[in-house]
Amino acid sequence: MKQNWLFLVIALLLVGGLWAYGTYIAAPRPPHQRPPGTTSPNNRRVERTDAEWRDILTRSQYNITRERGTEWANSSEVTHEHRRGTYACVCCHNPLFTSGTKFDSHTGWPSFYAPVVSNAIYTEPDGNRTEVRCSVCDAHLGHVFNDGPEPTGLRYCMNGVALVFAQIK
Ligand SMILES: [Zn+2]
């Protein structure tokens, strides 16, 4: 009889645990909290659920932009793109950079010294680095460092997977 009770308690704990885990994984991820005062060009805003992003994006695009991943160095054709054009966010097509501020950083990642407009992106502290995100949809784009060329001295080190290039002829 005593053993039956023990069995019941263990069974209840198991069921309770599974239920709690189910609620946890089904819970929608809350939208990213942007720094206060963050603006975007024309106040444009794109918000989607995790499931919608998974639907729209490829696996690597989702991993980089929504899960803050980093692509392998030299893995993106965008790194070696030298034609005249613009680079937009792969998630929401917000224009982020132009070929005019692109430079060869020899890092294996596409690098720019300035965004197309200052509020196209916003930054957040990320350990000892500074993360760069799209101001329209919060996509993780890469990081910005203080070792870039003039006139800004900044190096926006981007993931090519997070960018869509459009040539201007
Ligand atoms: Zn975006």
Image: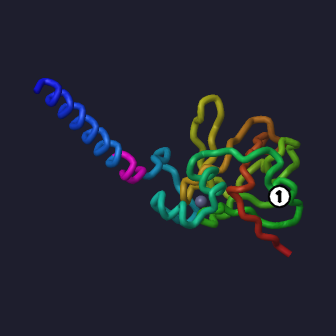
Label 1: how many Cα within 10 Å (few below 14, some 14–19, many 20+): few
Which residue is situated farthest in the top direction here?
2
Query: For residue 149: magenta?
Result: no
Depth check: 86 or 1 in front?
1
Q: Is residue 114 left or right of residue 105?
A: left
Amino acid type at circle 1 is Glu
Q: How many marks?
A: 1
Residue 29, position in %: x, y? 42, 50
The residue labelled by disc 1 is 77
Q: Quadrant of residue 13?
A: top left
Q: Secondary structure at mark 1?
A: helix
Query: For residue 28: magenta?
Result: yes
What residue is shown at x 25% (from left), y 40% (from top)? 16
- The part of the chain drawn in magenta is 24-30
Q: Quadrant of residue 120?
A: bottom right
Residue 165, position in %: x, y? 76, 65
- Queried on whether the Cβ of the residue with tag 1 lies below 8 angstroms from ligand 1, the answer reads no
Depth check: 87 or 26 in front?
26
Say which quadrant the C terminus sits in.
bottom right
Residue 36, position in %: x, y? 46, 46
Q: Quadrant of ligand 1?
A: bottom right
Residue 122, position in %: x, y? 59, 48
What residue is shown at x 73% (from left), y 49% (from top)? 158
What residue is shown at x 60% (from left), y 45% (from top)? 68
